[in-house]
Amino acid sequence: MLETAGNQMLKFGTDGVRGEFGTELTTSYVAALARAAAKVLQCRLVVIGRDTRESGLALEVAIAESLTQIGVEVHLMGVAPTPAIAHAAATGDLVAFAITASHNIYTDNGVKIFGNGGRKLSDDEESRIEAEIAGELAKVTAGSAVANRGTSHPEYLEKYCAALIATVPKNALSKLHIALDCANGALSNVAPDVFGALGATVSTIHAAPNGQNINHECGATNPATLSEVVKNVKAHAGIAFDGDGDRLIAIDNTGSIVDGDHLLAISAREMKRNGTLRNNKVAVTVMTNIGFHRAMTQAAIEVITTPVGDRSILAAIKDNDLSLGGEQSGHIIYHDVATTGDGLLAAIRLAVLVANSGQTLNQIASDAMTSFPQVLINVRVAKRTKNIEQIFSEEILQAEKTLADNGRVLVRPSGTEPVVRVMVEASQHEIAESVATTLANAITARLS
């Protein structure tokens, strides 16, 4: 049964559409979204995959029924990581839908759309799809008990796993013990098998999804438990994924976090050494730590900075013909072999580097870069506001004067929720915390 749409039409954010299931993101909305996308992208065949949220199946059914009613063939991957869904689109030159809210709580869900070839949609395509949705909502009807809901195609996920395994020599990780935190998400039945196939000894936690525990006190957004596991089992490294598997955070052999900035620094230096860092450049976002920029200057690697979001990173990669880009949050894009961020691919590459280096991950990460202390405060506001930098220009200028050349300030609205993110870096944590708190309080006083 289709639910009625919410009062406010969802718009594309930094990575697809996302909202609370049943209120903001409804089955009728995604059905209309699917039809609108099929019309704009001229789909004849669509692949659909989903993460482990309890709402995923209902959304899958709504999308599949809506598409088959207008003559689009639907192939179902079932539970699958977003990079595998993108891989299906890339290798099959078709359109794919990933039903996921990434690192959000289980009550949220969303839809990411990959165009033919596994690419992110353009701004123009997203705008055209949004313009079509209202009209399609009026046409959407509930499917019957015998409605065509597509056919199951597990081979897409199997091909993705085989492609990853084929990127490195057989038993490349036979000397490593790797601890995995699968966030009770889409990699729960994938990552342990892939690492095992590469010869690693694997310890796995949070790989028992029940529809409601995805990302709950686990995974890339909360790797504390994984840190303890790494130390307890004396693993060479730990890898924490997010719910849909498109990003990762690593834990070194001492139990310390190795974030996306360090992972990018490690990859950029290694790729420069082996001649695969195309044009000697790497793309990052405005959230990337000052320490990364200084490390790249020392390594004679040029840095291109973009707005937040892997979509922005991908645009910079395409415009500058790059092979590497990513975010502090752990989206790492190896564009020579993937069209989007892929946590499992990045984890494999990191593990192979550790296996071949003769160093610990702690040594490798320490050599790659030194982070400036960073404080991030999320300020929930009454509604999304785009021109935050203008509204608080005086406060931001004062904060920048306080830091001078020994830090930086970034104040930006979230692309997915009514939150303003205040990020401050400084040479000392106490200074960063003081400046960030002052800015956050000013925002709270006027906008909350």
Image: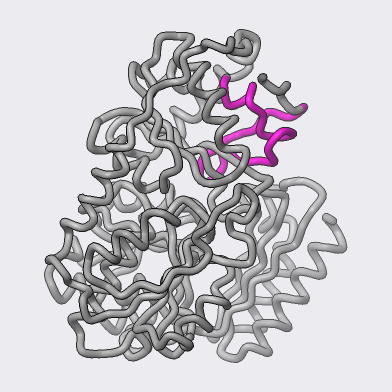
Q: Nearer the viewer, residue 288 or 224?
A: 224
Q: Would residue 247 be found to the left or right of residue 264 on screen?
A: right
Q: Which residues are magenta?
A: 7-31
Residue at 36% of width from left, 63% of height from top?
192
Q: Would residue 247 be found to the left or right of residue 142 on screen?
A: left
Q: Can you say whether 254 is above or below 12 in the image? A: below
Q: Nearer the viewer, residue 31 or 218?
A: 218
Q: Position of residue 27 (x, y in %)?
A: 63, 26
Q: Can you say whether 42 is above or below 177 in the image? A: above
- The quadrant of the rendering that contains the C terminus is bottom right
Q: Position of residue 178 (x, y in %)?
A: 35, 75
Q: Quadrant of residue 201?
A: bottom left
Residue at 67% of width from left, 29% of height from top?
26
Q: Position of residue 384 (x, y in %)?
A: 72, 46
Residue at 53% of width from left, 64% of height from top?
206
Question: Is residue 11 found inside the magenta-colored segment of the image?
Answer: yes
Q: Is residue 18 shown to the viewer in this render?
A: yes
Q: Position of residue 253 (x, y in %)?
A: 39, 87
Q: Is residue 260 shown to the viewer in this render?
A: no
Q: Can you say whether 421 is above or below 78 in the image? A: below
Q: Quadrant of residue 145?
A: top right
Residue at 47% of width from left, 83% of height from top?
371
Question: Is residue 39 found inside the magenta-colored segment of the image?
Answer: no
Q: Quadrant of residue 268?
A: bottom left
